[in-house]
Image (cartoon, helix red, strand yellow):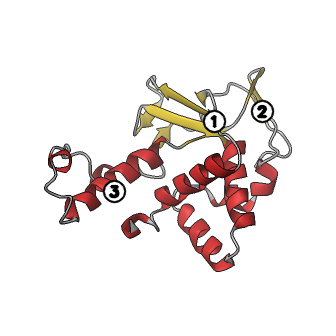
Amino acid sequence: MDAISNVPEFIILRVIRNYFHHVDDIEEYSMQVEFEEWGIYENNRHLIISLKDFAKALKNFIDNTRDEKYVKKQTELMCEFIEYEIIARVDEIVNLPKISIDGKAYELGIDVFKYVYNISNIIADECRKIEGLKNIEVILNLEETYTKEYNIPKRDLLYMPGNVPVMTTEGLVFPKSYVKNHNHP
């Protein structure tokens, strides 16, 4: 589907999938989230992979794609949904140790749920435009909410100043105290 080949969410998921399929396993953690009155969050589901695994997938893509212009374009597009620092410091992040938050060791994570959710909505919109697909029952029966108009934005978390959460493979953690590793981005 050419219509999605330059969509940031698709590129990110393709990089993860290619690494998972061709190089190594990526462990994922799925969870439902419940929040207190500290802020607003666009979604209450997480599909988390470790930040280290994500960096390995990015590094594999960057190091093993021969066309440098293509890599540059794809990473620029990915930055619409991931922080530039992750790409700029990918070599450091692949070796990132666990961090200590309130005396417990955590592995940093990245939530890929929004990428899956968003690309599903974009594909639904595209299927509604394709002559051979738009009148198929499954497409006709899609709820109205399956559209990019309901996509989750890059910044989908509002929180109280001074109470900044950290995404870990166990979900969002709100540190009382936080020991920053010197190599941490």
Q: Which mark is residue 59?
A: none
Q: CA distance from mark 1 to mark 2?
A: 10 Å
- Tag 2 or tag 1, which sits nearer the N-term? 2
In this view, the residue in front, 122 or 65, is: 65
Nearer to us of marks 1 and 3 is 3
Q: Residue furthest top?
A: 103
Residue occupying image coordinates x 39% and y 45%: 117
Q: Is residue 185 left or right of residue 119?
A: right
Counting other residues with Cα less than 10 Å from the Cα at mark 3, is it few (<14), some (14-19), or many (20 or more)?
A: many
Residue 92 appears in the rendering: yes
Residue occupying image coordinates x 75% and y 49%: 185
Circle 2: element type: strand
Amino acid type at mark 3: Ile
Q: Quadrant of residue 130?
A: bottom left
Q: Position of residue 72 (x, y in %)?
A: 64, 73
**Quadrant the N terminus occupies:** bottom left
Q: Is residue 16 above or below residue 48?
A: below
Q: Is residue 80 left or right of residue 169?
A: left
Residue occupying image coordinates x 80% and y 38%: 180
Q: Which mark is residue 122?
A: 3
Q: Which mark is residue 99?
A: 2
Q: CA distance from mark 1 to mark 3?
A: 29 Å
Please say if the residues under marks 3 and 2 sit with CB atoms less than 8 Å apart: no
In this view, the residue in front, 120 or 38, is: 120
Mark 1, residue position? 166
